[in-house]
Image: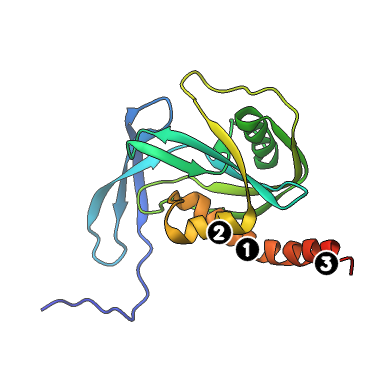
Amino acid sequence: MSSANPSASPSRWSKLDEKIIYPTRIFDLRSALYRHPVRQTERDFYVVHSPDWVNVIALTSDGRLVLVNQFRFGVDAFSLEIPGGVIDLGEDPLDAGLRELREETGYVGTQPRIIGSVHPNPAIQSNRCHLVLVENVVRSAELDWDADEEIEVRTMPVDEVYAWAQSGKITHSLVLDALLFFAPIWAEKKAQFEQSRSGI
């Protein structure tokens, strides 16, 4: 009979060692040795160690979001997303967000701020993804894609983006995270847009 108790708090395992099993240009696969504090059992767990990432909600002055559509090798299909990428070593997440937005789309904006931060997959990944909002964006910079990047840049009304997310046309989990954090901000801004249009 199992001694598991689903109402008990789980134990905090102790990390004893960590080593790189296989390095790549975008992440390291590491083996982490942990010990359970009660059972004293030791287990190796695999961890994907990557730099932190940034994803950008880029809002135009007329209530549209900047989106990027590109081929993704993990799913062997196209993926509609928001701009984003890897944060360089020592780079501030806000600076990284502005840089990735400019490089991928040519858009620049004002008032960058972090609206959220998430662990992409805490079961196997060690990094965080910072979610940045940039407002009043306009397309005014040269594109600076990586060697293998081919990106379709488009803008869509915010409410249409949410409709696409809810219908399953947008499936990238980090994009959905960003939209979740942006939702209450958009609710306020949408009311302001509507008041401005009605002249109230």
Q: Is residue 175 left or right of residue 72?
A: right
Q: Nearer the viewer, mark 2 or mark 3?
A: 3
Q: Is residue 176 left or right of residue 11?
A: right
Q: Nearer the viewer, mark 2 or mark 1?
A: 2
Name the residue carrying label 2.
162
Counting from the top left corner in percent of width and height, residue 58 is at 67, 45
**Is tag 2's residue or tag 1's residue first in the polypeptide sequence?**
2
Residues at badges 1 and 3 in contact (C-beta under 8 Å)?
A: no
Name the residue carrying label 1.
183
Name the residue carrying label 3.
195
Label 1 Cα neighbours within 10 Å, binned few <14 / some 14-19 / many ≥20? some
Counting from the top left corner in percent of width and height, residue 195 is at 83, 67
Type of residue at label 1? Ala
Visible residue check, residue 86: no
Real-space Cα separation, disc 2 to disc 3, in angstroms: 21 Å
**Is tag 1's residue or tag 3's residue first in the polypeptide sequence?**
1
Real-space Cα separation, disc 2 to disc 1, in angstroms: 9 Å
